[in-house]
Image: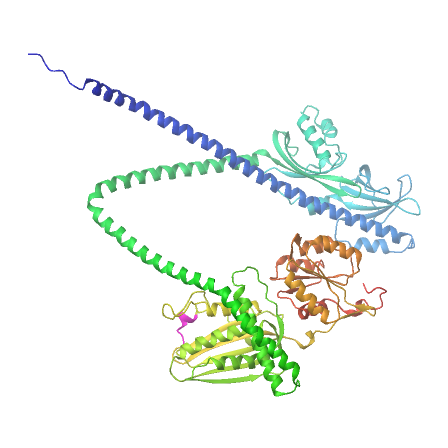
Amino acid sequence: MNRMKSPFPKRKENENARLSLRPALLAAAVLTSVLLLFAVGVSAWTSYSTSLMSSQTNQLQLVAQSLGQSIELSMQEYMDTLQFLCQVESAVDENDPLFQDFLLTQESSIYDLLWEDEDGVLLKSVNGSSLTADVLLTQAEEDVSIWQYNDTDGTHYLCIKQKLDTGGYLCLVINEENFYSELISDIHVGTNGYIVVKSSENTVIMHPSREQWGINVIEGRMELYPNLDFSSLSEMVQKQVEEEVGIYEYYSYWWTDPDLPRVKKISAHVHASIGGDFWIISAVVDYSDFYDPIVSGFARISLIFCCILVAVLAVTLYIYRLKRSNLRNSAEIQYLKELNETLEELHRREETLAHQQRLQVIGTLTGGIAHEFNNFLTPITGYADLIMASVEPDSELYENANEIYEAADRARDVIRQISSMSRKNVETVYKSIVAASFLNRAVRMIDAVRPANVQWKSEIDLKDEKILGNATQLHQVLLNICINAFHAMGKTPGVLTLRAACVERSEPAHRLYGEQVSDEWEHFLHIALSDTGCGMEPDVLAHIFEPFFTTKQNGQGTGLGLSLADQIIRTHRGYLCAESTPGEGTTFHIYLPVQEPESANQPIEWGQQHKLRFLIADDNQKVLKMLQKELKKLGLEPVICTRKAELVEQLEQVAYDVLAIDETLEDGDGISFCMSIHGKYPYLKKIIMTAAVTRDILEARQRQIIDNYVMKPVSDTTLLDAIRKCTEPSDHDGGENGT
């Protein structure tokens, strides 16, 4: 009987072949993964090292630039000092102790004063210096040169020579050792790095190795070290002469090391202007000081990454095995959990969708409501104007019509706010408000919405105090607080009391625990709103000014009323706080800065010739037009600008008295512009308009780059008050043109 052959011989052969290929495929996959990781690692290393080296060299460049500016300013100061001494030299008697007294009062590196004849022969020395080994460093000007000298002790000196009108030279001697110690010696770059200062002719002016002072960078060192390779250094030195700023890698030696090891260095240099010539300020560091930490850091990062990768793989494998072993047991629980989460998410989405729909409806209706209300207000204001025009101003009918007009004007302001809710950067124009009149109108407004169960009391102890602000916004604050008080008292009988008085700065400073009260104002308008409602617990009181915090039931409040009130008061440079006792009631305290009497809107006379000539710059046209309009009421004719180019053109054409410039313009910032014209217009008063006082503004005023600053929102009152504080008119009295 013949044995039956397998019907699937080829299938088994194919399966065996596939099984034999699996190790090869696995090896290929592993090799591909390794190569891919290697390529990613090389790319990451290249990007990482390039980025860090660039950052390090940029820092080195900043060091060189900063030091270059310091040396440039110091040398210019020395040359200015020498020029001054030359001017007074001819007017001073030979025995006059002026120059001795000058040297005694110097705390800088100035060491001596010398007089030389036309041939450079020493004629006289104040301190009796005897200097030798002169090296010309720089011909700063046609009649001003800078030399390097030594004395018998080997001390180096910089000598600035200026030719006198009477012949010969007056020389200002600077102790170069002290100059180097004050500006350079304490600057450390890298492990072995240093700073070197060279002339435009590559003469070493200052270097950590004193024996190299006064020698040529290449030729002088070749004489000291004839067997060294200077090719790379020579190329770098030539580039430093040709280029004002640069960073280079080159090979050289550590001159401060007796063994003179040849190393790769990085040099960042800048040119410091010395009169009509320049010095080269170079910061030098060992390449390994930058590169080795980068290699070490990348190695640590790579090791940490590998450890994390191994840990992740191990945890992933463990979780995978754990999930497989528990999959059947947890399937039903997982299903129920997902179902519950799905239902909760569906519920949340339904609530969110409903809220968004309500907001969408409100947004759609806003434009139509604003339009319709403006249509309603147009005949109201029109007929009110007609009534006031047809009756006597002191009649009762005129007063009633005026009340109608003011109420309509406030309503129009509210409509404008509703219409601009979706717009950004809306500027609010603040006006001077008589506090008593403002509060009397607020009392009538609140009394109109007061529930019948609430008794209203007002105690206003004010005279003619004024505040700077927006009446509509402040009415909104009072209304929000009163509505909260009505809700707190509910339907039970209660009392709502408004008290207002002018108080000293010490009262808000005492009441506002932990908050610094600005010392810009001496008096504040204190408004206290007290209710006899349910009060609040301390933990609730601590959060009432936070957005979306509310104790009302869902749907009865957004939690934005008090948050908005606090924001409005703070934009008015005021303060809002609350005190509450559970079961007894709550008192809200509002403090608004009071305009001092001397800040009245009166034009400032500038000398005896004319009134102030104003130049105002801001990137917001609304602010510019408001200030221009208010200043024109005072008889002034301000000129407004939005760009620096316009400012430069105006200043060149007209001798302005005051420049009021915003902290930011369309093409720059105010402080930088004031720095750019510093000293060009000595009688121009520069005032910065800012939303917040920064360190740059304070330093600019301290350095007299600006004369004063004012906080936004700005009005003609605050601007004129700032001018009064920074300028006395008597300073300019008697000038021919008032500037």
Left or right: residue 448 versus residue 431 is left
Q: Which residues are magenta?
A: 535-541
Q: Quadrant of the C terminus?
A: bottom right
The answer to whether residue 108 is above or below residue 560 is above
The answer to whether residue 20 is above or below residue 246 is above
Left or right: residue 577 versus residue 156 is left
The answer to whether residue 645 shows anywhere in this view is: yes
Q: Quadrant of the N terminus?
A: top left
At horizontal 29% and vertical 22% (from top left) the residue drawn is 21
Q: Nearer the viewer, residue 53 or 190?
A: 53
Colour style of the rendered protein structure? rainbow
Quick one: which residue is furthest to the right in this view? 166
At horizontal 64% and vertical 63% (from top left) the residue drawn is 622
Could you say where residue 548 lies in the image, as x and y percent from the top left? Answer: 43, 65
Left or right: residue 78 versus residue 448 is right
Q: Nearer the viewer, residue 261 or 53?
A: 53
Quadrant of res 604:
bottom right
Quick one: which residue is furthest to the top in this view? 1
Residue 540 part of the magenta-drawn span: yes
Residue 278 part of the magenta-drawn span: no
Could you say where residue 417 lies in the image, as x and y percent from the top left? Answer: 54, 67
The answer to whether residue 381 is above or below residue 292 is below
The answer to whether residue 471 shows anywhere in this view is: no
Q: Nearer the viewer, residue 414 or 66?
A: 414
Quadrant of res 71:
top right
Could you say where residue 331 lies in the image, as x and y percent from the top left? Answer: 22, 46
Left or right: residue 58 versus residue 598 is left
Quick one: which residue is furthest to the bottom in this view? 395
The answer to whether residue 250 is above or below residue 720 is above
Could you say where residue 32 lies in the image, as x and y percent from the top left? Answer: 39, 27
